[in-house]
Amino acid sequence: MTINRIAALAGGVLLLAGLAYASLFPADWQVRTGLHWLVEHFLIYFAITGLVCLAWPRPAYVAATLMTLAALLEALQGLTLDRVPDLATAISGASGVLVAAILFQLALSLRKRGRGGPESGQSARRAS
């Protein structure tokens, strides 16, 4: 594993730990960006997914894991005294994960195609 992948993984884990902490500590302690909370959830999960996909380029596995985590963190908010689980918020986080994973998969596909992978048609031209 290269230093860039380790750094990306560390960044993703730190963001994820921060997100879990922010999801479960008292609502009065929250610092808001001024954006709607659904947009905030989308953006943070988008960023986390991007970092984790840089470290572990398996977007489908990363997406499945983080979408499950988004739903789990939202459900765990029901155990706190001042929070209520919200389906729209869980869907917003999961959609941030899904969009980032799809874009990362697209980037991987385009990168393989640019390197002369089997999808590019270069192998067929060499054979003839």
Image (tube, rainbow, N blue to C red):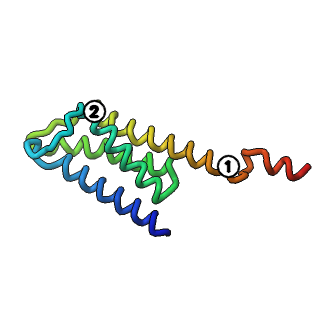
Earlier in the chain: of badge 1 and badge 2, it is 2
**Label 1 sits on what residue type?**
Gly
Q: Which residue is mark 2?
A: 38
Q: Secondary structure at mark 2?
A: helix
| For the residues bearing labels 1 and 2, Cβ distance under 8 angstroms | no
Q: Residues within 10 Å of mark 1 (few under 14, many from 20)?
A: few
Q: In which quadrant of the rendered view does residue 110 lie?
A: top right
Query: Could you say which disc has been placed on residue 64 in the image?
Result: none
Amino acid identity at mark 2: Leu
Q: What is the x, y in percent for residue 69?
A: 33, 48
Give the foreground label among 1 and 2: 1
Q: Nearer the viewer, residue 2 or 60?
A: 2
Q: x, y percentage for residue 23?
A: 20, 46
Callout 1 secondary element: helix
Q: Is residue 84 above or below residue 110?
A: above
Which circle marks residue 114 in the picture?
A: 1
Q: Is residue 55 left or right of residue 32?
A: right
For image coordinates 21% across by 45% down, the residue present is: 76
**Number of other residues with Cα within 10 Å of mark 2, as a class: few under 14, some 14 to 19, many 20 or more:** some
Residue 25 versus residue 99: which sits nearer the camera?
A: 99
Number of dots carrying numbers: 2
